[in-house]
Amino acid sequence: MNLHEYQGKEILNSFGVRIQRGIVASTPDEAVEAAKKLTDQTGTSWYVVKAQVHAGGRGKGGGVKLAKNLEEVKSISDDILGMMLVTPQTSVEGKLVNQVLIAEDVYYPGEVETEEFYVSVLLNRATGRNMVMYSTEGGMDIETVAEETPHLIFTEEIDPATGVLPFQARKIAFNLGLSGNAFKEMTKFVTALYNAYVSSDSAMFEINPVLKTSDNKILAVDAKVTLDENALYRHKDYLEMRDVREENPIEVEAKAVGLNYVDLDGNVGCMVNGAGLAMGTMDLIKQAGGDPANFLDVGGTADAARVEAAFGIILKDPNVKAILVNIFGGIVRCDRVAQGVVDAYKSMGDKINVPIICRLQGTNAKEAKELIDNSGMEIISATEFQEAADKVQEVLA
């Protein structure tokens, strides 16, 4: 589950990570009041107005601007709120901005220059261990840094039994070229950041940039946080942070009825039981000359109501030209699924306006094929993978 910047910073702050302070607002007037409160709390007289959307590169799309007084806070907030923000990480349509974060100016003058770093914590899937990835090239796209100057990206793997050890925190601060108080601040920052990542059951914490201020403080200016949805039962307060306005509405609807659904840019809808079989089915569709329109795992209880709900969600995509139902009857019997498909087809009537290929294999597969063949419905049955692929190819031709 993705979080907004201000939500990610709330989590970081709760674990002792120093952050750029700010207050979220939904209207230009609220933004002005937020700026006034921020001045009272921090003494700042300049403000950074940041669009709150689930996407990086907001500054490139005009979603991050500096305001030097309250009048500019109001006018800039008025411009950003309600805009369709297009960034390198959004679709061409962009994302609607519903909130802005009014943040303090942390690039104040001082005795030394400010510096920006990149620091993230994530899982290294090759080793099964968490790692801290960091670079001196903060404020830039890390993908660009990796491509053009890979020697400037460092990683530090963390033993899950010990967490970040003091020597590792010092190594990170040293590789970032820090010394004195900034060095000590960075070791504290890295340790607190890792503790926040582990304790919140996150999938990723990305701080870009981490700022060394002109008075040698280390703080998170941005925060991109992704929580592990499988662990949200342990964090009911984090679950309340979900902003469904930022998510695909079809995926939200599927989640509400208990379906595992991911929207894709293809023309063949998939209805499968089991994630592994679903991935294999998507490969099958590609080999047949089509493109999968979705990933959809109906699970082990593929009764008529569940199948009907799945059909309805798949058919919300206007690009779908055919639907492939691919069920392996292990726990669930194939004839039960077949009956569910037939009942759903009858119930939905003319709402189903694309060909359906139904491959059922496993327990009672023979009875399932007979049930579909004798139903009188326009459902194309198949028993083998290649046969299903050929049927898909035929209906797309």
Image (cartoon, helix red, strand yellow):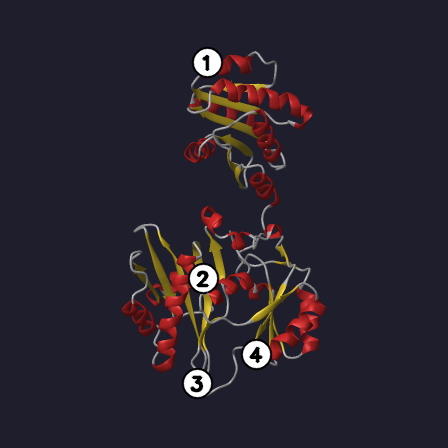
Determine which residue is flagged by label 1.
366
Label 1, residues with CA under 10 Å away: few <14, some 14-19, many ≥20 = some
Please identify the quarter of the rendering in which residue 377 is found. top right
Alpha carbon separation for disc pair 3 and 2: 26 Å
Determine which residue is flagged by label 4.
42
Determine which residue is flagged by label 2.
206
At label 1, the amino acid type is Lys
- Helix, strand or loop for disc 3: loop
At a point 45% along the width and 88% down the height, the residue shown is 111
At a point 61% along the width and 81% down the height, the residue shown is 45
Alpha carbon separation for disc pair 1 and 2: 52 Å
Label 3, residues with CA under 10 Å away: few <14, some 14-19, many ≥20 = few
Please determine whether, in this image, residue 185 is positioned above or below residue 363: below
At a point 61% along the width and 27% down the height, the residue shown is 354
Q: Earlier in the sequence, mark 1 or mark 3?
A: 3
Residue 15 falls left or right of residue 250? left
Alpha carbon separation for disc pair 4 and 2: 25 Å
At label 4, the amino acid type is Thr
Residue 300 falls left or right of residue 102? left
Q: Nearer the viewer, mark 4 or mark 1?
A: 4
